[in-house]
Amino acid sequence: MNLQEQIHRIQSMMGTINESKFFHRRINLDDVAWLLPVNAQQIFHETESYKQFKYELTLRSVEAIMYNEYGLGWEDLPEQEEIDFVTEVSDYFDDIIKDLYKGLKK
């Protein structure tokens, strides 16, 4: 392997590290959708706003999957990437989460 190929390989590897998809590779969104209603009532009573409910509910589901499937606790997870992923997924499931919140608010 010549120097140019080595440089290209290292640059490719660095791009992969910087753009890691840790959660995207491990979390099945169907599993998250299934867990949302399971955790909704408890999270509803622990939060003070819809925004907090939406984030915390998604976070609880993602962390449950990571722990149950991979044995990883929150302290083992990349913090900023987890925040970004949970925010993205909570926006993706906004309609479902909103319906859960409205049902619990009654």
Image: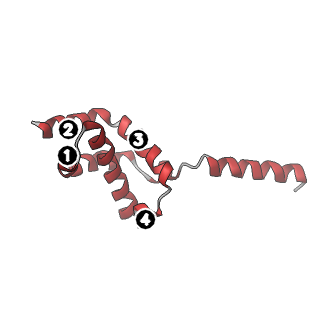
Q: Amino acid at mark 1?
A: Phe
In the rendering, which numbered label is found on residue 72? 4
Do the CB atoms of the residues marked 4 and 1 lie less than 8 Å apart? Answer: no
Q: Earlier in the sequence, mark 3 or mark 4?
A: 4
Do the CB atoms of the residues marked 2 and 1 lie less than 8 Å apart? Answer: yes
Q: How many angstroms separate mark 4 from mark 1 (CA)?
A: 25 Å
Q: Position of residue 17 (x, y in %)?
A: 64, 52
Circle 3 residue: 87
Residue 23 seen in the current view: no
Q: Amino acid at mark 4?
A: Leu
Circle 2 residue: 101
Q: Position of residue 29 (x, y in %)?
A: 38, 45
Label 2: which secondary element: helix
- Residue at the spot x=17%, y=34% of the render? 102
In the rendering, which numbered label is found on residue 30? none
Outermost residue on the front side: it is: 48
Label 1: which secondary element: helix
